[in-house]
Amino acid sequence: MSSYSTTLVNLSDNLKCVSVLLPLPLGRVYTYAVPEELSTINPLKKGDFVSVPLGVREVVGVVWDSEVGKVPLEKLKFVFEKLDTPPISEISMRFVEWVARYNMASLGSVLKMLMSVPDALKPLKMVMAYSLPADMPKIKMTPSRSKIINALKSSQPLPTAGLATKARVGTSVIKGLVKAGALLAVDLPPPAAFNVPDWKAPGPVLSPEQAFAAKGLRAQVKSGKFAVSVLEGVPGSGKTEVYLEAVCEALAQGKQALVLLPEIALGAQWLGRFKERFGCAPAEWHSDLTQAKRRATWRAVATGEAKVIVGARSALFLHYQNLGVIIIDEEHDQSFKQEDGVIYNARDMAVVRANLGKIPISLVSATPSLESLRNVSQGRYLHFDLPDRHGGAELPDISIIDMRKDRPDPGKWVSQKLIKALKETFVAGEQALLFLNRRGYAPLTLCQGCGHRFKCPQCTAWLVEHRFIGRLQCHYCGYQVKPPEECPSCGQKDKLFACGPGVERLAEEVAELFPDIRAEIAVSDNLHTPGQAQNLVHQIENRDIDLIIGTQIVAKGYHFPYLTLVGVVDADIGLTGGDIRALERTYQLLYQVAGRAGRAERPGRVLVQTYNPENAVIQALRKGDHKGFIETMSQDRERNNMPPFGRLAGVIISGEDERVVDHAASSLARTAPRDNGVMTLGPAPAPLALLRGRHRRRFLVKASKEVNIQARIRVWLEATDLPRKVRVQLDIDPYSFM
C-alpha cells in the first residue's frame, strides 16, 4: 500500500483525478485523486488496474473513461498504486458496458467476470536461478562441483532443480557452491505456461465440402473484419477439422483464438484432436482448474502468451490482448446461457464481442438454433453446410418403437426390440449407448401406504434417489438426506416406492439382462472434471466398455468407431411443458445422440422408444426431415410473435417472506407495461415457486422485435417502490422458465 494519506486537505486546484470502476455490484464509477508519481513519472491511463481505498478496505479496480465526478476535497481519496498488469483494451471496456446495458446488470458485476482471478493481477513470482560469476573464487574442486560448473558453462542460468538434473548431482552440491561464492543467484521470469501451437504443421486431408467451408472461414480471419458464419453439418461431417483451419489462420496472423464448448467434458477428444493438429495443448478455461492454473492461464491470456483458449462460457470474459477469431461449438446448446449472477447468453454476447473487435465468429452445430438460422435467412450471417459424413460413413437408420404396443415387462423400461438389438450388437463385438436424460435411480420416491412424496424442504422439487450413494438429492439446491427406513408421514415400513427410471435404475435392469457385459454410467455426477471424462473416453476407445448408459453429457461431440447402436430409452422427456423451446431443444438433443452411432465404416442404427410417436419431433427424426422440422417450428414461432420473431424478458421477484413477495408482485402488476407493442403476463408462481428457500413469482414481458424491451422494463421498475427484502432478477431473452 502507498504511504499517501487517503484523505486530501488544502490541495491545489490542478489536482488530477480519475474515474475508477470497481468489480462490485455497483452501477457507477468512483472518483479518486492521482498521486504525483502516477501523474508524471508513471502516468495512469484508461484501462489500467489500480488499487484504491473503499471505506476501510483496499480494492482493485480499473481506470474508466467516464467523466470525473465532483467530490469535495475533504472526501477525496488517493489511488494507492498502479498494478503491473496489461491494461484492458478499449474493446473490452466497451464490451463490459454493452453486456451490462443489454442484460440490465450493473457495470461492476460484469467487470468482476473479467477480473475473476484477483491473484492474477499481480505478476508471477520470479524464479531463482544460478549462473557463474565473472570472477570465479578459488574453491576446493570435487567431481560433483566440476559437473555443476561445466553444466553452466554451456547453458543459460538454471534453477536449482534444473541444474541438479542436468549435472546429475544432488542439490546440496549447489548449496555448497553458493555458500563458497562460486555460483551467482539471479532472478528469471517464470517459464512459459503454454507452448505456441505450430500453425505451419500440415492438417488433415479435407473433403471438397470441408475445403470450401475452411477456405471461407480462413478468408474471414485474414480479412480482419467482423463477420458471422454458421457452420452446419450432420454429426460426423468433420466440422471441428474445418473450424480449426480458422484457428490456424488466426495463429498465422499472430492473433489469439477462442473456442467455446458447452460442456467441458466434451473437451476430452477435442483436446486430443487439437494436440494432433498443432503439436501442443491449448490453454483451458473452466471451473475445474486449480487456483494456480487459473492464475497462470488468466495471466498468459492477458499478456498474449496463450494463443488458443478453449473453455466454457466464462472464457469469453478473459482479458484478451489480440483476439482474432471466436468459435462457438454446439452453438445451439442451452449451456451457453448463464442463469445465475449476471444472466447472459454467451453465444449472443460472443457475437457482440466479435463485432466490437472487428473479428469473425463462427457458430458451429449439427442443429443450429432458430435464432441463427433466422439470421442466415435474412442475410446477416453466412452459411456453410456439410451435408455428408466424412470418409464415406453413412448416417444411421432410425427406427421408432411405439411403447404402447411393445410394452416392456412391469417395472422394466427396455422394450424387447431394443433388447434384441443390444444382443446383436454385443455378439458382433460392437458398442452400444443407452440414452436416458435423467440422473440418479428414480426421479420420485413415494409411500404406497399414505401417498407421501419426498420433496426438497427448500425448493418446489422432488428429491431424486441416488441409490449408488444412498442419498435422496435435490438437483436444484444440493440438499440431500439419507433415505429413511420408514415413511416420515405414516410411519409404515417397506412402503417406500421408487417411481420412474433414472440411469442408475436402467443400469440395474441391463445388468440383469446382460450380466457379462462391461457397462459404464456417464453422467455429470461422475464426469464433472475433464480428467474423469478423458478416462472414460480412453476406456471406450480401447473397447474396455461394451455399453454406455448416459445423459446429455454424452449426446454430442464424441466419435467412437465401434459404437453402432444408440437406444433412446425415453424420448418423451422434454416434449411437454410451457417452454417455447421445448420441442426444438428435444429434437436437437435426440438428433445429436442419434449421431453417435455408426460414425466409421460400421453402419449404425438408432432405436427410439416413445409413447407419443405422432409428435412432430419423433416424426421428424423418423423421416430424417431436419429442414422440414425447422420450417414448422419457425412458422409456429412467427405466428405467435415469439423469438426470433419477437422479444421476451423474464422478471423474477423473490424473497424469504412469501407475503412480502406477493405484495411486491402485486405492486409491479399495477404498473406493468401493456401497450405500444408490449404485453406483460403475470405475476404467477414460478414453476419452481420455492428455490433455495426463496419464494418466487414471475412476469413474462413480450414485445415486438423493434421494441427496446430493456428501456420499457427500466422505466417500469423505477416507477415502482419495492421493499428491500425482495430481489428482482432480470432475464433478457430467457431460455429457462423455471
Image: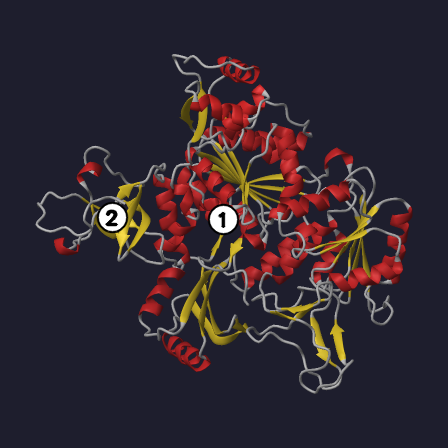
Q: How dense is the environment of label 1, judged by Cα within 10 Å: few (below 14), some, or many (20 and up)?
A: some
Identify the mark nearer the N-term, 2 or 1.
Answer: 2
Task: Quadrant for the N terminus, please.
Answer: top left
Residue 420: x and y in percent read: 90, 56
Determine the residue positioned at 55% across, 74% down: 458
Q: Which residue is mark 1?
A: 314
Determine the residue positioned at 11% across, 51% down: 9
Residue 472 visible in rendering: yes
- Quadrant of residue 629 within the rendered picture: bottom right
In the figure, 162 relative to 659: above or below?
A: above
The outermost residue toward the front is 140
Residue 625 visible in rendering: no
Determine the residue positioned at 41% across, 68% down: 728
CA gap, disc 2 and disc 1? 26 Å
Query: In terms of depth relative to the viewer, which is nearer, 175 or 626?
Result: 175
Residue 494: x and y in percent read: 78, 80
Classify residue 155 as left or right of residue 7: right
Q: Which residue is mark 2?
A: 19
Q: Secondary structure at mark 1?
A: helix
- Quadrant of residue 205 within the rendered picture: top right
- Kindly identify which numbered label has been placed on residue 3: none
Q: Amino acid at mark 1?
A: Ser
Q: Amino acid at mark 2?
A: Ser
Q: How dense is the environment of label 2, judged by Cα within 10 Å: few (below 14), some, or many (20 and up)?
A: many
Classify residue 454 as left or right of residue 613: left
In the figure, 294 relative to 176: above or below?
A: below
